[in-house]
Image (cartoon, rainbow, N blue to C red):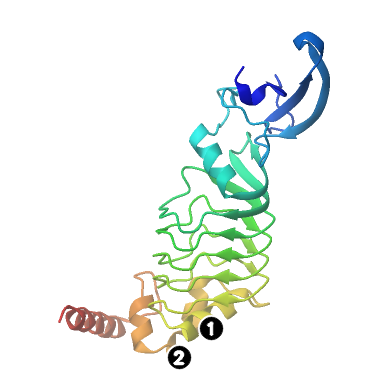
């Protein structure tokens, strides 16, 4: 046993309760005997001296597991408690998670479930939201990333959603519910147009992304139409399509000069 466990011995439970790794905390009795069994906490207990460098985290190798690197990273970013659901592989956070300014392109293979606080991923290199929490009860910060769309975004964000200084040319994947404000300044598509699309998508008469863009299309300036255009925009006729393609070609040449 290593020195960091001189006062507390950890024994992983031989069974999994409700599909979640459980750690039984034993306090040593006289002459090294097992003392009374302490309360059960869920793996890994954050901000705790209970995590031991020799601790094994795989009671059943057939279930999804977290590597030591992932555990250390999660612990360093979390203010609160973590739980890992072995039946789904999802990590949930009871508290806040801050992985901002780390130059991240992904979440190190971690997939999140619910975060009860905020989730801060500002100033990174995310081009996809794969693995991001399915639900965030407070704010989601994504300022200064090269995101072009919101595919795989949480279904619900309880607070603000900040997407300033990205590369958004689509709001596909926008959370169904945003409890606070939506911030989308300094993106290729104008802030005004993005807000109009988001308003339709989040209104009482919920529209999906494609329907929302179609409803607004005639009001959208050509500069933004060019950026928003996708081949699956079925309402675009051949003549308008040629116009958009010509404008895009001209814009590309202009940017090269």
The residue most toward the right is 36
Q: Residue at x 66, y 23 (%)?
A: 5
Q: What residue is shown with label 2?
A: 219
Q: Is residue 53 above or below residue 192?
A: above
Q: Which mark is residue 218?
A: none
The residue most toward the left is 257
- Please name whichever residue, 53 or 159, is drawn nearer the observer in this view of the structure: 53
Q: What residue is shown with label 1?
A: 196
Q: Earlier in the sequence, mark 2 or mark 1?
A: 1
Q: Is residue 137 above or below residue 32?
A: below
Give the number of callouts. Answer: 2
Q: Is residue 124 above or below residue 6?
A: below
How far across and how far down the image is residue 182, in percent? Answer: 58, 75
Between the C-alphas of marks 2 and 1, the distance is 10 Å
* Quadrant housing residue 230: bottom left
Helix, strand or loop for disc 2: helix
For disc 2, the neighbor class at 10 Å (few under 14, some 14 to 19, many from 20) is few
How far across and how far down the image is residue 141, in percent? Answer: 55, 65
Q: Are marks 2 and 1 in contact (CB under 8 Å)?
A: yes
In which quadrant is the N terminus drawn?
A: top right
- Please name whichever residue, 44 or 180, is drawn nearer the observer in this view of the structure: 44
How far across and how far down the image is residue 225, in percent? Answer: 37, 82
How far across and how far down the image is residue 208, in percent? Answer: 55, 70
Helix, strand or loop for disc 1: helix
- Please name whichever residue, 159 or 238, is drawn nearer the observer in this view of the structure: 159
């Amino acid at each position: 046993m290593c020195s960091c466990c001189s006062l507390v011995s950890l024994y992983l439970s031989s069974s999994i309760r409700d599909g979640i790794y459980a750690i039984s905390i034993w306090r040593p009795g006289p002459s090294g005997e097992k003392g009374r069994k302490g309360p059960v906490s869920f793996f890994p207990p954050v901000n705790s001296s209970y995590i031991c460098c020799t601790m094994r985290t795989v009671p059943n190798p057939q279930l999804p597991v977290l590597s030591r690197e992932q555990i250390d990273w999660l612990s360093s970013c979390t203010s609160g408690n973590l739980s890992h659901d072995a039946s789904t592989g999802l990590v949930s956070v009871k508290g806040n998670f801050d992985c901002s300014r780390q130059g991240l392109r992904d979440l190190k293979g971690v997939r999140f479930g619910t975060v009860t606080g905020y989730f801060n991923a500002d100033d990174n290199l995310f081009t996809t939201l794969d693995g991001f929490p399915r639900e965030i009860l407070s704010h989601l910060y994504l300022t200064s990333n090269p995101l072009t769309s919101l595919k795989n975004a949480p279904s619900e964000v309880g607070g603000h959603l900040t997407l300033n200084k990205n590369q958004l040319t689509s709001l596909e994947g926008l959370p169904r519910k945003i409890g606070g404000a939506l911030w989308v300044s300094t993106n290729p598509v104008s802030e005004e147009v993005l807000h109009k699309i988001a308003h339709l998508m989040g209104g009482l008469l919920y529209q999906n992304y494609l329907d929302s863009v179609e409803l607004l299309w005639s009001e959208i300036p050509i500069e933004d139409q060019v950026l928003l255009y996708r081949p699956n925009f079925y309402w675009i006729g051949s003549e308008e399509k040629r116009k958009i393609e010509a404008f895009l070609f001209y814009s590309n040449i202009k940017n090269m000069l």
